[in-house]
Every structure is written in structure tokens, then in C-alpha cells.
Image (cartoon, grey):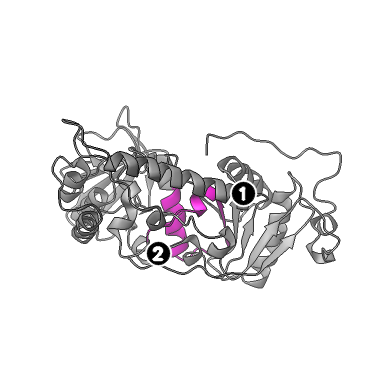
Amino acid sequence: MNEQSPIKTPVRTISNVPDGMQPMALAKLVEDRIKAAPDDPASVVFVARDGRRLQRMAEILGAMLPGHTILTLPAWDSLPYDRVSPNNVTLAARMNTLAALTSGAKGAVVLTAVNAFIQKLPPRDVVGKMSFSAAVGRVVDSEKLIAWASNNGYLRVPTVRESGEYAVRGGLVDLYPASAEAPLRFDFFGSQLETIRTFDPDSQRTTGTLKRIDLTPMSEVVLTEETIRRFRQNYTAAFGGNTVDDTLYASVSGGSRYSGTEHWLPFFYEHMDRLADYVGDAPFVFDDQVKEAFADRAGQIADYYEARETARLAPPVAGAGAPYKPIKPELLYDIDVEPTELAGTTVIQFSPFLSPQTRKGDDAGVALPQALPPSASPPTSTCSRP
């Protein structure tokens, strides 16, 4: 697998940005950036120090910049080296953002958090090929839709009732995308797609119709002959050829998904990319205390790896099956670099402090005196765990 070398980038500090002022300061940067480069796939990337601040920024910025595309890249809601996969909603949000960035989204604001930023991503060119688009009245191969759903993390069931499921009944294909409010029913007549309907998963009755749909995968792991072959090669090269009782290896080899497969993500691809590979020349804006949060996460990843590796090398226990085999941290995470080294060509750091050396144009208190009156309280919000 190819490794990329981080590039050291000069950092511009915007001072006098206390808590509550970040959305206003970021909104100004977004507007300035769009005026300067309206055709860029992303206008600004903001890296919050945790998931709560990411969600709060998304809520406030959405209200401050109506009409602007706000994309979020949340972190997996599972621990490093976990035995379970991230939930479908989190994976769908991530894949929707990555797919949008590969499909020519213009002027989008990308919001992420340290726990997501430190983690490498599927290759940009692969993600660009992982979507499926269909329009009513057009020639659409139903078998390609079925194969796409199977390869991209959807579970085949007799009746679709929950997100991440699909079903096939004659000329009908039902599919429930994780990011959709309702499942979809594709009605084919021969090779032509006659209708796309939404339906109630409980009653199975139609609730609406669509003219076209753009689908994104349920998982960052796509199972094809090529990715399965690459996984098998990388897995045995890293851990040896003894795969007896190894349910992960057996499941993937058989083309089936196994809970937690995402934690071996680099084994499926020739190389991994970073967020900077998706966003062109968009500037990266770092929240206050990102460096400290990044170091904490890197330490946590290393600790979890050491615990898993110690257990793997311990004497085997009869009847326990194959031990958990953790990939090396540097394959999936950037733990030995500064966060600014993972950004693009322009890096901006928000700071709550005002230095005597701060230039007037980099003093947010001067640039945005009317954004938040001294007597006003910043908006508050609640959100789920990061």
C-alpha cells in the first residue's frame, strides 16, 4: 500500500475568536473564499476538536449561510480496533459527503472533527465509482442495481423494513438507504425503470414518487472480487497463512460482511487517501485546541492497538477461536504527524487570544464587531455522542 508524505504548511492565525464566535468567523471566511474561487469543489474545511462542536457548527452555520451546501464528515462512532462496525447513519453521512466531493460539488463547506480527520479514507477514485444513479423512463439494468446493493453493504431480506436492507420480488427491487427518510421501490418493466416510489416500511404502502435517485454505499468497504483478493493477500501477509477458525477471514473470503470489517479498511484498497485529497485547494480551518485533541486521539489509538496486539500474541486459549488481529495504526490513522501537516496548501488556526503581533486583518474582533453583540449569548444545541 502506498504511503503519502505529509507536507508542512504555513499557518495563519486568526486571533480573538472566543467560544461562540467560531461560526461567525468561519462564515466570513466562507463568503470570502467563494468570491475568490467559486468553482472549487470545497470552499472551506473546518476541523472541530470534537463531535459536539462539529454538530453545533453545522447547525449554526446552516442558519447563517442559507443556500450554501454544508457537508459533514463525522467520525466513526466505534472505538479504534472495535469488534463492531460504525452505525449505518454515521457511515451514510460519511459516504454522502465523500461522494458529493467526488461528483463536482461546488462551494461546499466541509465540517469534520479531529477523530475523523486523523483517520484515512477510501481512495477518491474508488469512491467516485461507488455511487449508483437511476432515472425514471431510462434504461436501467436491475441486475446491476442488485449487485451494487450487495457489494456496497446492503443486506438482502424477504421484506425491507430497516435501513441498509434490500429485497427483490420479480420486477420490483426495494432498497432502504441509511440517509433516506423512507425506503425506495424500483419498478422495472424489462430493462426500463418505470417508477421510483417511496413506501412505508410497516404497511408497505406507497407514500410518494421520485423522478431520479443518486445512491451512495452503506459502507466504506466495497466487496468485489478485486477487493476481496487484495484483503486476503494483505491479511495473510500481515498475520500469516493460518486462518483456521478466523471468522473475519472466512466471511470476507466468501463475499459476506462481518461486524467490524471496517477496522481492516486499508487491506481492501491499493492505497488510502486523506481529506485533503478530496477538497482541492480549499483552506483548512482549525478549531482551538485541535492540536491537543489530535495528540489525545493518537495516544488512545496507540493504547488500543497495544492492548489488541498483546492479546493476539498471548498463549492461545482452547476453544476461543482465532484472536483479534489488529492492523498497524499507521495504515488507518495518521498518528505521528502534526494535524496541520494533513491539510492542503492553506491552513488557518482559530485562537481565542489576541497577540500584540496580530495583524488587523487577522483580528476577528475587529473584522466582525457586529456579528455577536456583547450582551448576546451564542446559540446552544445538543447532539449525540461524537
Q: Is residue 45 above or below residue 64?
A: below
Is residue 149 shown left or right of residue 215? left
* Residue found farthest to the top: 202
Element under label 1?
A: helix
Residue position for label 2: 124
Q: Residue at x 49, y 60 (%)?
A: 275
Q: Is residue 354 left or right of residue 149?
A: right
Q: Quadrant of residue 310?
A: top left
User: Which range is magenta?
Assistant: 93-122
Q: Callout 1 environment at 10 Å: few (<14), some (14 to 19), or many (20+)?
A: few
The image position of residue 79, as x and y in percent, is 42, 40
User: SS at mark 2?
Assistant: helix
Percent position of residue 239, x then y = 23, 52
Magenta span includes 96: yes
Residue 209: horizontal and vertical position, in percent? Answer: 37, 44
In screen coordinates, is 380 left or right of 198? right
**Alpha carbon separation for disc pair 2 and 1:** 28 Å
Q: Which image quadrant is residue 202 in?
A: top left
Identified by mark 1, the residue type is Glu
Quadrant of the snapshot with the N terminus:
bottom left
Taking the magenta stretch, the answer to whether it contains residue 137 is: no
Q: Residues within 10 Å of mark 2 (few under 14, many from 20)?
A: some
Where residue 184 sits, quadrant-wise, is: top left
Residue 39: mark: none
Mark nearer the N terminus (2 vs 1): 2
- Residue 359 visible? The answer is yes
**Residue holding disc 1:** 292
Q: Nearer the viewer, residue 70 or 251?
A: 251
Q: Amino acid at mark 2?
A: Arg
